[in-house]
Image (cartoon, rainbow, N blue to C red):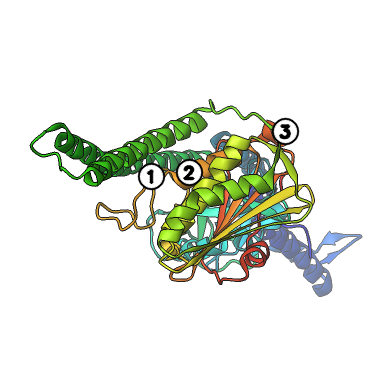
C-alpha cells in the first residue's frame, strides 16, 4: 500500500486527465504506419507507395495533434502545480486544516499543515484515522455533519474534539489531550476535489479551525460566573443564618435583662432570678462563639492565621475535648467513646488549632446524633501520618449535599426552620486548619446510618506547612456502615498522601 497523497498532490494529479488522449493519438499514428506497412503501402527503403496518399496526411495529423495536446497538457500541469502551491500557501495563511471526506466520513485527503497545527501527521488521519481521532461523544455529530453536507448544498457547522498527540500526566495514569475544533463542511462534487481513487459521487470538503484556547477561556468564564453565583448564594445563606444565630440570643438577652431590670417584673424567687441570669450568660457565650467563628474563618481565608508548631501530648488533648462535649452528650444519653493508640504520646503542631479541629468535629457529631446514640473518636499513627477518625450514629448526610460540605455557612438541612442550630462554619474552619497543617479530609456518610470523618495530618507539621493550603481537600463517599469507619474510608476513598 503506497504512501497516501496529500491534498496538494491529489489536486495536481487531477489535471493529468487529458494526457492519455495525446498518447492515444501517438498510438494511432504508430498503428497507422504498421497498417500501411502490412498492406504494402509503406516500407523502410522506399517510404510510402504512390497510391496511398491518404496515409501521409492521417499520420501527420495524428502526430501534430499529439504534439499539440502534449504541450497543452504540460501547460495545464504547470498551472496545476502553481494552483497547488497557492492552495498550500492559502491554507497555511488561514491557519486552518482542509480535509475532504467521502460519504462514510473517511478522509480522502488532508492538507499538509495538519502536523504543524494539530501535531498529527497527515498519514494518521487518512481513511478512518480522522474518525478514530474524534472524541467518542462527538462522533455522531461529526458523521451527521458529513451526511448533511453531502446531501445538501448548504454549509454545515459543528464543534467537535480531536485527540492530539499530547498527553497529560494524571499521576497513576495519563490522559490524552483533545483539541476543540470548529468544523465547516460543504458538499464537494466529483471533479472538485474527490476524483481520486476510490471516491464516487458526492463527498464533503471540511475546514477545521483550532478553537481550543477560546473554548478554554469560555470555560474559565463560565466557572468564574458559577463561582460568583455560588458566592452570592453563600452571602444570602450567611445573612439568613446570621439573622437566626444573632437575633435569637439577642432577644433572650434583651428580654430577660428587661425583666431583671424592672422591679415590678423581677420574680421574687432567687432561683428564678439566677435562671434568668444563666440564660443571659448562655446567650452571650453563644454570641461570642459565633463572632469568634467568623473571625477565625476570615483569618484563615485571608492567610492571616499563623500556626505556632510545638510538641504537645495528644491523649490529654483528646480527653479535654471529649470532656467539653460530654455535658451536652450526657443530657441526651449519647455515649462518647475515645481511643488513642498506645505509644502515640506526642505530635508536633499548633495545639490551639488541633483543639479547634477536635472540638468542631465532636460538637457536630453530638449535634447531629439522636438521643441514646454514640459518638467515637480514635487516633492512631500510620508511618509519619496521624489519623483522626470521628464517627457518629446520627442522621447522616444526603448524597447530593456531600459535594458541598465544608463550604462556609452551608448546612445539609439548611433552611430558615432548621432542626439544628449553628452557623455552618464548623467544618469550614476544620477544613482551613487542616489545610494549614498540610493535611486532607475524607468523609463517608449515609442517611440514617451516620457519618465518619477521617482527618490525616503529619505527625510533624513543620515541614508540611511550607506547602500548606488555605483549604484542605475533602473526598466523599455516599455509603457508610458503623464498625468499619477507618477501613471503609481507607479502602474506598483515595486520600492524597501528605508530601
In the image, farthest residue toward the left: 264
Please tell me whether residue 285 is drawn above or below residue 52 in the rendered image: above
Position in image of residue 198 (x %, y %)? 63, 68
Q: Which residue is farthest bottom?
A: 39
Residue 37, placed above or below residue 117: below
Label 1 packing within 10 angstroms: few (<14), some (14-19), many (20+): many
Q: Earlier in the sequence, mark 2 or mark 1?
A: 1
Mark 2–mark 3 CB contact (< 8 Å): no
The reply to whether callout 2 and callout 1 are in contact (CB within 8 Å) is yes
Which residue is at the front of the view, 10 or 99? 99
Residue at (78, 47) in percent of width and height: 384
Q: CA distance from mark 2 to mark 1?
A: 8 Å
Label 1 and label 3: CA atoms lie apart by 30 Å
Report which residue position mark 1 lands on. Answer: 409
Marks 1/3 in contact by CB < 8 Å: the verdict is no
The location of residue 190, given as percent across then percent down, is 52, 61
Q: Secondary structure at mark 2?
A: helix
Give the alpha-carbon distance from disc 2 to disc 3, as whole Å.
22 Å
Q: Which residue is at the front of the view, 389 or 284? A: 284
What is the secondary structure assignment of the residue under circle 3?
loop
In this orientation, which residue lies closer to the viewer: 168 or 308? 308
Residue 379 quadrant? bottom right
Residue in view at x 46 percent, y 35 percent: 297
Amino acid at each position: 500500500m503506497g504512501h497516501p497523497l496529500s491534498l496538494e498532490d491529489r489536486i495536481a494529479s487531477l489535471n493529468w486527465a487529458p494526457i492519455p488522449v495525446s498518447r492515444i493519438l501517438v498510438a494511432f499514428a504508430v498503428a497507422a504506419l504498421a497498417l500501411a506497412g502490412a498492406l504494402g503501402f509503406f516500407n523502410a527503403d522506399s517510404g510510402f507507395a504512390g497510391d496511398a496518399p491518404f496515409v501521409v496526411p492521417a499520420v501527420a495529423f495524428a502526430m501534430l495533434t499529439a504534439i499539440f495536446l502534449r504541450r497543452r497538457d504540460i501547460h495545464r500541469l504547470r498551472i496545476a502545480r502553481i494552483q497547488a502551491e497557492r492552495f498550500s500557501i492559502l491554507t497555511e495563511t488561514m491557519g486552518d486544516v482542509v480535509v475532504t471526506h467521502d460519504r462514510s466520513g473517511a478522509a480522502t485527503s488532508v492538507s499538509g499543515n495538519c502536523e504543524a497545527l494539530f501535531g498529527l501527521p497527515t498519514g494518521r488521519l487518512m481513511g478512518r484515522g480522522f474518525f478514530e481521532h474524534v472524541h467518542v461523544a462527538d462522533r455522531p455529530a461529526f458523521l451527521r455533519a458529513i451526511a448533511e453536507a453531502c446531501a445538501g448544498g448548504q454549509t454545515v457547522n459543528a464543534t467537535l474534539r480531536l485527540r492530539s498527540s499530547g498527553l497529560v500526566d494524571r499521576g497513576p495514569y495519563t490522559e490524552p489531550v483533545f483539541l476543540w475544533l470548529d468544523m465547516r463542511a460543504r458538499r464537494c462534487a466529483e471533479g472538485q476535489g474527490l476524483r481520486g481513487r476510490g471516491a464516487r459521487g458526492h463527498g464533503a470538503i471540511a475546514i477545521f479551525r483550532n478553537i481550543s484556547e477560546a473554548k478554554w477561556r469560555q470555560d474559565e468564564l463560565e466557572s468564574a460566573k458559577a463561582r460568583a453565583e455560588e458566592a452570592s448564594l453563600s452571602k444570602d445563606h450567611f445573612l439568613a443564618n446570621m439573622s437566626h444565630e444573632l437575633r435569637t440570643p439577642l432577644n433572650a438577652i434583651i428580654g430577660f435583662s428587661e425583666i431583671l431590670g424592672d422591679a415590678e417584673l423581677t420574680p421574687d424567687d432567687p432561683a428564678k432570678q439566677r435562671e434568668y441570669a444563666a440564660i443571659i450568660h448562655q446567650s452571650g457565650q453563644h454570641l461570642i462563639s459565633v463572632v469568634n467563628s467568623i473571625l477565625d474563618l476570615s483569618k484563615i481565608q485571608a492567610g492571616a492565621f499563623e500556626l505556632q508548631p510545638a510538641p504537645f501530648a495528644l491523649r490529654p488533648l483528646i480527653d479535654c475535648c471529649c470532656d467539653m462535649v460530654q455535658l451536652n452528650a450526657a443530657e441526651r444519653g449519647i455515649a462518647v467513646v475515645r481511643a488513642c493508640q498506645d505509644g502515640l504520646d506526642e505530635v508536633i503542631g499548633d495545639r490551639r488549632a488541633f483543639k479547634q479541629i477536635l472540638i468542631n468535629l465532636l460538637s457536630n457529631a453530638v449535634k447531629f446524633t439522636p438521643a441514646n446514640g454514640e459518638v467515637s473518636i480514635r487516633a492512631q499513627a500510620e508511618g509519619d501520618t496521624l489519623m483522626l477518625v470521628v464517627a457518629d450514629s446520627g442522621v447522616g448526610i444526603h448524597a447530593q449535599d456531600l459535594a458541598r460540605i465544608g463550604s462556609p455557612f452551608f448546612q445539609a438541612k439548611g433552611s430558615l426552620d432548621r432542626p439544628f442550630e449553628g452557623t455552618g462554619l464548623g467544618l469550614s474552619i476544620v477544613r482551613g486548619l487542616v489545610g494549614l497543617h498540610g493535611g486532607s479530609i475524607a468523609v463517608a456518610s449515609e442517611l440514617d446510618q451516620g457519618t465518619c470523618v477521617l482527618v490525616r495530618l503529619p505527625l510533624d507539621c513543620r515541614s508540611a506547612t511550607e506547602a500548606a493550603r488555605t483549604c484542605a481537600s475533602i473526598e466523599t463517599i455516599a455509603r457508610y456502615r458503623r464498625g468499619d469507619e477507618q477501613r471503609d474510608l481507607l479502602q474506598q476513598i483515595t486520600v492524597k498522601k501528605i508530601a
